[in-house]
Image: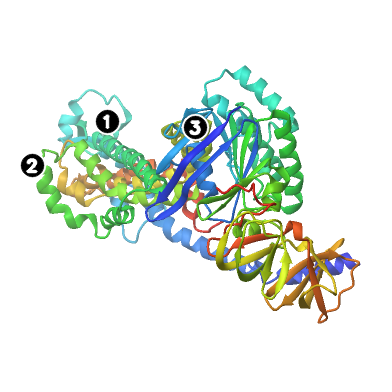
Amino acid sequence: MAQIRVENLRKSFDQFTAVEGSNFTIDDGTFFAMLGPSGCGKTTTLRMIAGLELPTEGKILLDGEDVTFRRAAARDIAFVFQLFALYPHMNVAGNIGFPLKCQGMGRREIRERVQETARLLRIEHLLSSKTSKLSGGDRQRVALGRAMVRRPKAFLMDEPLGALDAEFRHLMCGELRDLHDRIGATTVYVTHDQLEAMSMADQIAVMNKGRVEQIGSPQEVYDRPASMFVADFIGSPPMNFLRFESGLRSGDRAVAFHSVSVEVPEIREDRASAPLALGIRPEHIRFADAAPVRGEVFGAEYLGTTQIVTVDTAHGRVAARLPSSASVRIGETVGLEFHSERLALFDVASGLAVRTASLGSARHG
Amino acid sequence: MTAAVAKSVLAKSTAHSIVEASPRSKAVAGGLVILYAVITILPLLWIVATAFKSQSDAIAYPPKVLFEPTLEGYVNLFTVRTRQTPDFIAKLPPPETWYDKLVRQRDMVIAGPSKVVPRFVNSLIIGFGSTFLAVFLGTLAAYAFSRFRIPLADDLLFFILSTRMMPPVAVAIPIYLMYRQLNLTDTRLGMILLYTAVNVSLAVWLLKGFIDEIPREYEEAALVDGYTRLQALRKVVLPQAVTGIAATAIFCLIFSWNEYAFAVLLTSGEAQTMPPFIPFIIGEGGQDWPAVAAATTLFVVPIVLFTVLLRKHLLRGITFGAVRK
């Protein structure tokens, strides 16, 4: 088991920069998710940690040891691919035992270790089957088995559930997390699916355009997004942004939102007047007749226990999550009341969060 | 009842689909295939039959379909004979073998073996040698083109392909002059190098297509699991590329086995292959057609065997990569 440290990691392909100056440390035993839209550099970062891609600049340290230019095989890590990459010319046992064969381990020992791994994954009955006959979930388990059998320092997983259907993905999420808890190995998990990242990870790194935007626990990333990108990418529906322009003074507990004063968590920095955005999660909006911010109901999506009501205000469209018992008529004018302690402020030009009492500790990548 | 209705609806809906052909179109298709097979196989059968005819039967008009078979063609192919007077033959000790006897009936005696065996061996060495080299080099090059970021890769691939844009014979004279300088004329090595050079471009292009189809993840998994790049190529990529390699090998072998123009130009003795040798099998009073036919029959055998051995791969190989999964 190991700690993984990435220092100023950069990777460019010809003109295109895939990863730009990343810095982070993954502690021993952490389930670390890298989350971001496609093309954000998360897979490239993972491949550099694995040794399948060489960085243009920067360092990768495994347990304090510099492995930046070491070949993949010499790093003692395991990689699980999105398409599983099970060797079609070998059966399940052959696939799981393959890394041990590479290391030149004796036949009997390989068989024992394969048995043990298969027992852990509950696929003992499949050992002599062909990989092409397996279901998606079983293929996934075999791929995991091939990664686990060597007892590597760390697991790297590149969208391992991406090829499964939705129902199975949910099941495997639980299984993966359970497996992680049992063997406790450092795991780096790349995904574009926020639900996977939120439900499994101890720490999430949100990436965008080659940069790490924020690193934190799922709660931190959701409750205290460090940038508009993070706030927008995480959460469904995403955070609402209401634009306005104002200066800020440290210690203020309200901002001048157009002609209305809106209460916010205590502001911790001074700023000259600039375009800002008020960030509100849909679940932090309530309908209140007396509220000064008003709008017309545009539509409602019924989701079972809750409903998403979209309201057109003078400053943009806003989505609110209300109990499904609330009766809403399309076209009616409503007042919007915000849960002031949970509001966020962003600087529109840089996209970064303004420091406030609730966001003070948010880390920028 | 509903099940029956559903079934009939299903049958109707697929009646004109490309999945199920009607019996009539099946019959027509079958007929066409048989016709094509007859057209292509008939000349081959005629050659095989001619090898067993006597010289007069071979040139009889109208052609004889039924004839008395004889091994004279094969005997003539493998031996050099001299004509003797009947008196001389009568004085010889009785013939030791059946072929001595056969030759003496024609007033001739065997003077020694012909050159067919060394020529056949040349063909085998040059044909399989150049095929092996072309496929070996082609696999390495195709793998590199497929997997690594090579500067000017597209241009290089085009250069490689451009060597196939004219008939190889177009460069026969420069190659002849070059080979004379290098003392490579009429050597097996020279012919192997030449055929390899011609085939390697085909091999690179064909194999690149096959290797492109194999997901990179397989080797990457092997690299992470402890193999070096070369081990991953040998243990993981090659087993999956067997189909493509087999198909490529057959194409290369067919070219170098059948090649005639360069063989005539560059070989005359030591390294002569079968194609230039066969037309010059001269019998008494002109072409010895049964012997020529016998040589042709033997010449075809290795290619047929090689193709039959690899046919399982060949069929998949030719259509492989045609459809994106």
Chain label for disc 2: B
**Scheme by which the image is coloured:** rainbow
Residue position marked by numbered label 1 in the rendering: B100
Chain label for disc 1: B
Count the marks: how many? 3
Query: In terms of image quadrants, where is residue A228?
Result: bottom right
What amino acid is at disc 3?
Leu
A363 relative to A285, above or below: above
Residue for point 49% across, 30% down: A73
What amino acid is at disc 1?
Asp
Chain label for disc 3: A
Q: Secondary structure at mark 2?
A: helix
B89 displayed left or right of B13: left
Residue position marked by numbered label 3 in the rendering: A61
Q: Which mark is residue A150?
A: none
What amino acid is at disc 2?
Gln
Q: Nearer the viewer, mark 3 or mark 1?
A: 3
Q: Secondary structure at mark 1?
A: helix
